[in-house]
Image: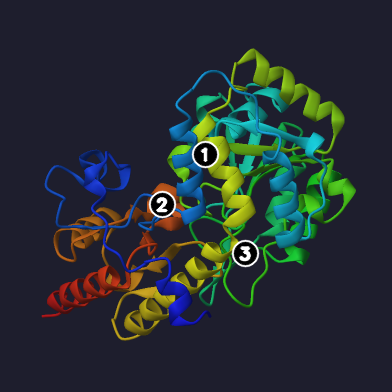
Amino acid sequence: MMGTNAIDKYSFDEEIDRREVPALKVHPIVIGEDGEHLFAAGVADMDFKAPPPVIEAMQHRLEHGLFGYEMIPDGLLPALVKWLDEHHNWSIDKSEVLVAPNILTALAIAASLFTDEGDGIIVQPPVFFDFFDVIRENHRAVIENPLIFEDGHYRMDFDDLERKASSPNVKMIYLCNPHNPIGKVWEVATLQQLGDICERHGVLVVADEMHGDLVFSGHRYTPFASLSKKYSDNCLSLISPAKTFNIASCCSAFTVITDEVKRKAVQVENSRLSVNKNNPYANVAMEAAFTKGAPWLKAAISYLEDNVALVRERLGRIPGAELVEPEGTFLIWVDFNGLGLESDELYAFLRNEAHWSVTRGKSFGKEGMGFARVNIGCTREKIRTALDNLESAIDGLTP
């Protein structure tokens, strides 16, 4: 962990009123018309200001005053390539990178291009809820390969994956690496075993690796496609600095495709759908983040690790609420099954008694029943207050 002075430099403890802008996290559509008093921990963005170099780059771009059509800046893709090489030991060529509006658009394009209507796409619940929506809205079939939860930890069920991948109509898997909502950073051996199964059965891996930069001490994010050429040629890697630098509303995403045939197909589809336009603010924000944002990120991760430590210590003393130990991301997965409440009862209890607005566990699949995803990318004081409220609420359940 970093020293206090390094963290304080970035004012992570500063309380910022997010209601000054139409932030989704605190919008009535998420927290309700009467939700101003709630611990807003549902939507997956952080309450921290973007890195100073990002803000400065956007201010400089604003001062230019002209906002006509633009090309991608010459420095953006090289900055991304350098970031992946230096931070994740992943060597790619900028010619292998396509720009996408966002991760969800890239997921949908992958499904429409490389599967047919009715084909199966594998997901590994509990997993990011939008995976299910993208598959169904594109008239594909959701094929579930649930993770195994044992002794407080998750692992992949490879026997089940082998069976489902061997089905002729299963053509794709959405891999979440690191895994949202459980905060699991998949190990190399796990990724290799998944990759071998998918290659053996002709199942294309579409890897959502948006949280890859947000990994805690003692763990290492490994881009799936970095493991070997055979894996990268059977993969579309989806990456974005949106979560890393808390710039979700003003950045784009990237699709890394080493196989030339697949890359050309995506290029053509991007053109057909006209998703290949550029936003000047997104461009300068991302380039500044990749070139100058590393110190801020290091400090942010350290602050998040301290937040996790606080949650770990407090939940260890609160009956009925157990932390599933996170390995990365600013999202934690909390097991409330010990409270003995049904799913809807649990959500009502957390909202009405503990004053928490969280993402319901069942949103991530039936395997999430009794769990909640909680965003801890906020000030420590806000977390302390939330834990105090939770403890009082659970105390009130006891006769």
The residue shown at (62%, 64%) is 185
Q: Residues within 10 Å of mark 3 (few under 14, many from 20)?
A: many
Residue highlighted by disc 3:
185
Q: Residues within 10 Å of mark 2 (few under 14, many from 20)?
A: many
Q: Residues within 10 Å of mark 1 (few under 14, many from 20)?
A: many
The residue shown at (26%, 49%) is 18
- Nearer the observer, 358 or 65: 65
Residue 251 is tagged as 1
The picture places residue 250, in percent across and down from the top left corner, at: 47, 38
Identify which amino acid the numbered label 1 is placed on.
Answer: Cys
Q: Quadrant of residue 148?
A: bottom right
Say left or right for 88 vs 275: right
Q: Is residue 290 above or below residue 322?
A: above
Residue highlighted by disc 2:
45
| Residue at mark 3 to residue at mark 1: CA–CA distance | 24 Å
Mark closest to the chain's N terminus, 1 or 2:
2
Identify which amino acid the numbered label 3 is placed on.
Answer: Val
